[in-house]
């Protein structure tokens, strides 16, 4: 290599870096990524403690990564190039058979993560001792377990089954098994191909299993007439994977909109909601059409439950949003509480709202990572 050529290559490389440095500096920071459906990191505050501890540089690196100009386009380019080279994983997402994307499920990274899992099981058990009403518990398998046959050969994942077995062994709450039913129907479209959630069909099968476990008779699948409300759903797994060549999913509603009235609460202030927020179907995150998406507290009052039906408190993640409509046929009220945003004693809530039964229901991959379940172990006043 000649000296002139080396100088040219160096100058070209520095110019490349300079262009993107200027572009990044000139582009205002975004607060939210519609494509990835998440809040983006912002410029960290510079302080002596943050600088000396190293947290400033860590946070700054995250900020630069999140705010890099043309970020979505670079992610897609990287995914396409790696797929062409034979790689079947990108950004923690496996590119699987049958045009399906499956998020990787990693084992706990350290002792702190292991302790959080232990604590979460302990909080569920503690809740059953803090209230006199029946407490039920169910952990839901994700695609990485039920659709493991679609994974690339040798794809490493932690075993969700060990956590389901552990949940079933708790002594306080009554265990409800949805895992067996979902695996029985694994050859059906019970999860979205491009999103981590189950479909309405998957939610129905889980609902039926849970009702049977609660000694209730679920409505037959034949009693519902599914309505396709969108055939253009590309979920969060699609966004994070960088893969841009898959066909979108279809979203269906099974239960009529007028089966219930809905009230959402933000900081104790009630606002009218809907069983299905149709406006969300025009947005990127179309799954949020179910109950309007994540809320601290949502109260669903049934119009179709039998007279004298009990009140259910459902401590949950977002999988419950698409299952809640089915529960309207068995409960007069369903109080959906998300501990990520609702920081109060669950036992106190049961007492204050005359709750008859409690169901703690989480997808395994959410349960093991959630650092907010301490509210289950808080006693009532």
Image: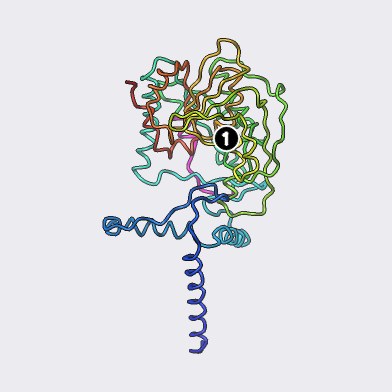
Give the residue at the far top of this rendering: 308
Q: What residue did someone put label 1 on?
A: 292
Which picture quadrant has residue 307?
Answer: top right
Marks counted in the figure total 1
Can I make out residue 154 in this image? no
Colour setup of the view? rainbow
> Where is residue 35 drawn, in percent x and y?
58, 51
Residue lying at 26% horizontally and 55% vertically, measured from the top left = 49
Q: Is residue 354 left or right of residue 254?
A: left
Locate the C terminus and report the quarter of the image it occupies: top left
* In the image, residue 207 above or below residue 370: above
Q: Is residue 230 left or right of residue 239?
A: right
In magenta segment, residue 80: no
In magenta segment, residue 163: yes
Instruction: Find the magenta span and give its range.
Output: 152-166
Q: Residues within 10 Å of mark 1 (few under 14, many from 20)?
A: many
* In the image, residue 49 above or below residue 127: below
Of residue 325 and residue 243, the one placed in the foreground of this image is 325
> Where is residue 160 drawn, in percent x and y?
49, 37
Can I make out residue 296 in this image? yes
Of residue 144 and residue 286, the one placed in the foreground of this image is 286
Which picture quadrant has residue 87?
Answer: bottom right
> Where is residue 323 drawn, in percent x and y?
58, 28
Q: Give the secondary structure at mark 1.
A: loop
Residue lying at 55% horizontally and 24% vertically, measured from the top left = 300
Residue lying at 59% horizontally and 21% vertically, measured from the top left = 328
* In the image, residue 279 above or below residue 211: below
Of residue 124 and residue 82, the one placed in the foreground of this image is 124
> Where is residue 292 drawn, in percent x and y?
57, 35
Of residue 159 and residue 3, the one placed in the foreground of this image is 3
């Amino acid at each position: 290599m000649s000296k002139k050529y080396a100088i040219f290559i160096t100058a070209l490389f520095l110019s490349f870096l300079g262009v993107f440095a200027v572009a990044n500096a000139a582009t205002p920071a975004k607060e939210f990524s519609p494509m990835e459906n998440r809040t983006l990191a912002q410029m960290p505050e510079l302080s002596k403690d943050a600088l000396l501890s190293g947290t400033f540089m860590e946070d700054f690196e995250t900020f630069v990564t999140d705010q890099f100009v043309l970020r979505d386009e670079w992610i897609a380019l990287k995914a396409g190039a790696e797929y062409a080279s034979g790689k079947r994983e990108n950004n923690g997402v496996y590119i699987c058979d049958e045009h399906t994307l499956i998020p990787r499920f990693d084992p706990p990274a350290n002792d702190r993560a292991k302790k959080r899992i232990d604590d979460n099981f302990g909080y569920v058990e503690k809740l059953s001792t803090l209230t006199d009403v029946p407490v039920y518990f169910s952990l839901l398998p994700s695609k990485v377990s039920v659709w493991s046959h679609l994974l690339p050969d040798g794809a490493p994942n932690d075993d969700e089954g060990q956590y389901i077995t552990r949940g079933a062994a708790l002594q306080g709450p009554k265990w409800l098994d949805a895992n067996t039913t979902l695996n029985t129907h694994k050859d059906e479209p019970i999860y979205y191909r491009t999103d981590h959630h189950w479909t309405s069909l998957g939610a129905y099968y889980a609902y039926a299993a849970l009702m049977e476990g609660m000694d209730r008779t679920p409505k037959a699948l034949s009693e519902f007439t599914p309505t396709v409300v969108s055939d253009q759903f590309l979920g969060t797994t699609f966004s994070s994977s960088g893969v841009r060549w898959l066909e979108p999913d279809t979203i269906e509603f099974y239960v009529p909109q007028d089966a219930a009235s809905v009230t959402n609460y933000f900081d104790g202030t009630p606002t009218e909601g809907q069983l299905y927020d149709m406006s969300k179907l025009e947005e990127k995150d179309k799954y949020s059409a179910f109950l309007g998406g994540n809320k601290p507290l949502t109260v669903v009052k049934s119009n179709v439950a039998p007279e004298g039906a009990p009140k259910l408190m459902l401590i949950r993640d977002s999988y419950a949003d698409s299952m809640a409509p089915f529960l309207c046929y068995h409960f007069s009220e369903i109080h959906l509480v998300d501990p990520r945003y609702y920081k109060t004693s669950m036992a106190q809530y049961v007492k204050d709202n005359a709750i008859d039964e409690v169901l703690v229901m989480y997808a395994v991959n959410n349960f093991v990572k959630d650092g907010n379940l301490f509210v289950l172990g808080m006693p009532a006043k």
